[in-house]
Image (cartoon, grey):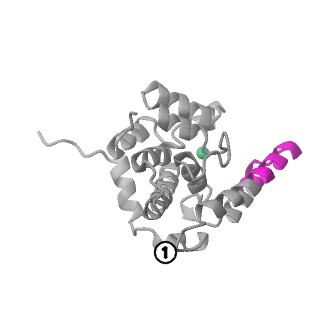
Amino acid sequence: MRIPSRENCYRLIREMRMMEHIVRHSLQVCRVAELLVQQLGEKGRTLNRDLVQAAALLHDITKTRSLTTGEKHSESGCDLLVDRGYAEVGDIVRQHVKLDTYFASDTPSEAEIVNYADKRVLHDRIVSLDERMAYILERYGDTPEYRARLRWLWDISNLQEKRIFAEMPFSPAGIELHMEKVDLAVELQKVLVPIEPLV
Ligand SMILES: [Fe+2]
C-alpha cells in the first residue's frame, strides 16, 4: 500500500492550490481523526494511522477546483489519488461524504473515521455532529429528494458516532478537550510555505 507522507500531502495541497480555509478545515479534520485513531488504538482497535492521516489531509483535495468546474469532489479526489498511485487513500476520500457501506466491519474502519471526523469540523471549528449536519442541510439541501438523503445521512451518522464512542473514555462533546493543542496558523504556514532544502 502506498501512502503519501505528511510532507507529500502538503506538497499535493500546494500543487492543487487549495484555498486556505479548506486547508485549515482539512488540518482540523486530521486532528480529530488522529485522536480517534489513538483512542481506538488504546482499546485494542488498531487502525492504520498513516492512512487515516493522509486521507484526512487530502479528503477535499479537489474541492477548490470543483467550485469552478462543478465536478463531484469526492469522486475526482479519489481519481486524482488513484492516478498518483495512492489507491487506498483515494478510496477513503471517495467515501468521505457517504460511506459505501455502514457498519461493514465489527469495529470502525479508517474510512469510517475520516468520514466521521469531517462531520465534526465546520470550516475550521470543532462542532457537534448536529451543528455540522444542520449546516450541510441548510447549505446543500436544494431539493426535497436531496434533503431526504441528507436526513438519512444525519441519522446514520448519529449511529456511527455511537459506535465510534462506545468505548471512548470521553463523550463526543469532549473531543476538543482531548486533542493535542496546536497553533493552526503555524501548521498552515508549514503547509503553504515549503521548507526549501539548504544548498
Ligand atoms: Fe468534502
Residue at far right of view: 144
The residue that label 1 is drawn on is 177
**Residue 124 lies in magenta, yes or no?**
no
Direction from residue 59 to residue 160 in the image, left or right: right
Looking at the picture, how far across and down is residue 175, in whole percent?
53, 69
Direction from residue 128 to residue 170 in the image, left or right: left
Where 16 sits versus 171, above or below?
above
In this view, the residue in front, 36 or 168, is: 168
Label 1 SS: helix
Direction from residue 168 to residue 8 in the image, left or right: left
Looking at the picture, how far across and down is residue 110, in whole percent?
52, 48
Give ligand 1's quarter of the image.
Answer: top right
What's under tag 1, amino acid-wise? Leu
- Looking at the image, which residue is at 51% across and 35% down? 90
In this view, the residue in front, 78 or 71, is: 78
Image quadrant holding the N terminus, namely top left
